[in-house]
Image (spheres, helix red, strand yellow):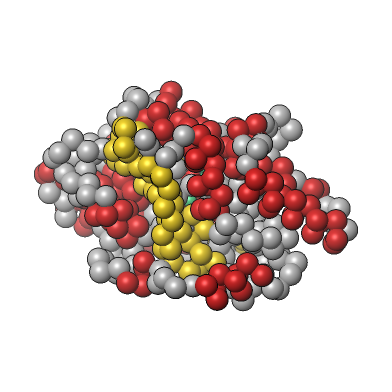
Amino acid sequence: MAYSYHKPTRDTCEVCEQLAKADKCMPVIDTYAGRASSSNGYPFHDWYNFVLGYTPTFPEYMLKREGIKPNNGQVVMDPFVGSGTTQLVCKLNKIPSYGIDANDFMVFAALQKLNWNIDTTILEKEKIRICNIYKAKIASIDLNDDLLVATKANQSRPQALDIRYISDKPLIKINILKEAVNEAKLSAAHHDLFMFAISAILVPVSNVRYGPGFGVGKQKPDVDVMSYFIKKVDLIIKDLLSVSEEQRQTLSETILGDSRHLSDYFAPESVDLMITSPPYPGDHEYTKHSKLELIFNGYATDLSSFRTIKKRMIRGSTTNIYKEDNDKKWIENINGIKTVTNEIDQRLKNDGATSGFEKLYTKLIWEYFGGMAMTLSECLKVLKPGGKIALLVSDSHAFKMVHIKTAELLAEVAKSVGFCDSEIILWQMKNSTSHKYKLRENILILKKP
Ligand SMILES: C[S@@+](CC[C@H](N)C(=O)[O-])C[C@H]1O[C@@H](n2cnc3c(N)ncnc32)[C@H](O)[C@@H]1O
């Protein structure tokens, strides 16, 4: 098993014990009267499984709570759009939205999920044509010839793709499926949608597993790639058929970029409400959660192209931190962050910690909150006066088990850049895979004066 999260070094947490004693409020998710918290069956949401994404329930809850309605000029934005859940909920509710993400594949995925101007009758016929091209190609290869399979897989394995990630036969089949889509001579929009459908089955046909960290599970020597593909395309067609003309026409724009420079891309005072889940200080490296998809779509072909994407991101992991980083300058005087970093330093000393990644812990915390300060000050420019941002963030124990109260610290950061009001709502208690405590996932709501 190769899950890459650093094991906690302690098994008790005083802060968790105190919070449990003082707890009076129920998490929203246990009392919410809207759609069930499970996202299963929510149209478009299941097209792609983003391990670090959230359920549509969160943006639904926020739209209702803040009285955002269609046809009254209100606009929503997600500055960390991921696979587009906020924008999807907005579009289904006929509310115009913008989104931005630093990861090329995430933007591609969100764009596919939000483009509803697709002719499903043509799509159905194209699916059959692609399957026929695929079958003819597969029939010409003897997949029982182990030497031939190994040679062919070696020739077509992208350079950045570790041999353990996907077995030879599924790799050959995926590549043939891509060739079939290319040979079917489709319009750009349909070509992209089929490529997306292939991307969305990469993890299930591969040996990669998330728990939630990136890992390699049991090797799958062979997989029925075509069945996965047909099932995915059928789901896509079913959901596209379910939308109304008004939903189809609702504006949604999603772009690639770094939200620490949000006002370079979006007009000032143009957004009423931002609904998002930013990275949080949990040592997640956000290109890892779309590693196969980035490689297979050619967005990242080697270490340097992965680094280009990672540098666009808020620093959230010890594998995404660079000598020249200096977002810290935004928050140097914030006491809450000083307290947390001092505590981590103390524990590192007590434990005699010497490894390279441990030495980066406090720098990472400073850079993370500094990057968030920069983003929040940009959000202020793009929000209308009185506009709000709702951030879904989890507490963290990722660094020497020091309890990081993410929402509380971000509220302090937000105040320092000019937000006037903040409110914290307990959304849910999240199970941890590595210790006995449940961690709080809060919604932090900030208001622009
Ligand atoms: C927790 S995920 C968002 C989940 C998403 N709302 C969903 O449900 O699909 C955080 C996202 O922030 C993106 N991100 C990190 N740093 C960024 C930056 N500086 N600018 C834009 N996006 C960034 C990551 O690529 C990742 O997709």
Give the position of the N terminus as an image quadrant.
bottom right
Q: Position of residue 176 (x, y in %)?
A: 45, 48
Camera-nearest residue between 351 and 300: 351
Q: Is residue 9 above or below residue 448?
A: below
Residue most toward the left? 245
Q: Is residue 134 left or right of residue 235?
A: right
Give the residue at x 32% y 42%.
Answer: 273
Q: Position of residue 191 (x, y in %)?
A: 33, 39
Q: Position of residue 129 (x, y in %)?
A: 28, 48
Give the residue at x 70% y 57%.
Answer: 399
- Classify residue 148 by image quadrant: bottom right
The answer to whether residue 232 is visible is no
Camera-nearest residue between 259 and 419: 419
User: How many discs appear?
Assistant: 0
Q: Is residue 223 above or below residue 117?
A: below
The answer to whether residue 435 is visible is yes
Q: Is residue 8 left or right of residue 287?
A: right
Give the position of the C terminus as an image quadrant.
top left
Camera-nearest residue between 199 and 130: 199
Give the residue at x 74% y 33%.
Answer: 323
Q: Is residue 238 left or right of residue 46?
A: left
Give the residue at x 29% y 58%.
Answer: 61
- Classify residue 295 by image quadrant: top right
Q: Position of residue 11 (x, y in %)?
A: 70, 73
Residue most toward the right? 352
